[in-house]
Image (cartoon, rainbow, N blue to C red):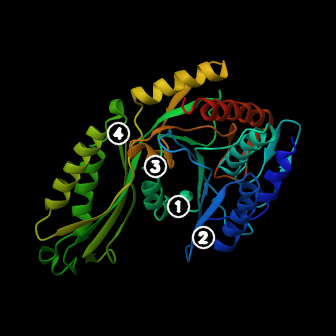
Amino acid sequence: MHYLDDLKKVIEINSYTNNKEGVDAVGNIFDGWFESLGFRTTQYQRETIGNHRHYASSHTENHPKLLLLGHIDTVFPPGKFEYFTEDEEWVYGPGVCDMKGGNIVLIEALRELKNSDIEIENIDVLLVSDEETGSDDSKYLTQELASAYDYCFVYEAAGRNMELVTGRKGVGTFFIDIEGKAAHAGNHYSDGHDANLELSYKLQELVALTDLDKGTTVNVGKIEGGIGANTISPHARMTFELRYKSAGERDRVLQTIEAIVNRSYVQGTSSTLSGGIQRDVMQTSEKSLELLNKIEMITQQQIISEERGGVSDANIVSSCGVVTLDGFGPYGDGDHTVKERALKNSFASRIEMSRKLFEHFIKNSNF
């Protein structure tokens, strides 16, 4: 498991999304590794976050192309969680499963191809630097590049039973700002327009949009407003999140949100909506299930699939019409906590799976 030494090397460099220096240091290491395999590196320079990286192999004209997708940023600021440890079964550290570990899986599988004298072609890699904060910058690059590909494998962590991911909920984050009118709560109560009260009505209407049977949730995660107990609130704000499993549910909820914002439940108040869809839904499709079946035949193993409520950059590529599967990384848990870990033997099985798939794709010019 020499590749765990490579994992240790990148884990011990802090790559918190806003730590540009650290993220770029990790990216530079991957640059060297991919270039040694014959890939051409394109860096997309950024001022406040790490540079995004696109690694291109040789391309055969009019042949299908495969994109391997990952991210190099992690969630903990410098000094919080930066060590790598291991025992007989597990490795521990920030990113061992989310998702520096997944990046190691994909590059090790490519190394095995190279060591077998198989020329890597029609397979490219994209590593972005801001996935953990929502891919607010990189999603535009990912969307632009996605049009060149027929398939995408995303190397987020596998499921507990080594599942691959065929679907992920879409997610949006929104803000409603409410303007009322301040007044003395004792002397001029009726002169005020209570923004907090308006917020309370809107909150209930928003939460009522939740439909668990359809996988739709609306969560008002933060509210704030007012000045003090003796003043009618002149302003209030709520932050809420929408998650959904289908485009139809997305459209239903978005239309109703607009109606809730435009309606004043408390006379004299007005509201404005901001924010939007962060990553659109990745819906399980006939094409993704067909690809899953082909993977089973190529690898000669049963593949369990699942849909997840959490999002990844798979949402972005899938929304561009690319046949996308996720969960090709190692199995792990505790991600986004100081207990993050990844199962050692899952690296070997995922590397073997990826190598077989890459070899088949190159030799047959398709799956």
Quick one: label 3, few (<14), some, or many (20+) residues within 10 Å? few
Question: In the image, what residue occupies the spot 55% across and 23% down?
Answer: 294
219 left or right of 104 in image: left
CB-based contact (under 8 Å), mark 4 and mark 1: no
Q: Quadrant of the N terminus?
A: top right
Distance Cα–Cα, label 4 vs label 2: 31 Å
Residue position marked by numbered label 3 in the rendering: 148
In the rendered image, residue 355, in percent from the top left (x then y), is placed at: 70, 34
In the rendered image, residue 365, in percent from the top left (x then y), is placed at: 56, 33
Precedes in sequence: disc 2 or disc 3: 2
Taking 292 as reference, is 196 above or below it? below
Distance Cα–Cα, label 4 vs label 1: 22 Å
Q: Residue furthest front?
A: 61
Residue position marked by numbered label 1 in the rendering: 133
CB-based contact (under 8 Å), mark 2 and mark 1: yes
228 left or right of 294 in image: left
**Element assignment for label 1:** helix
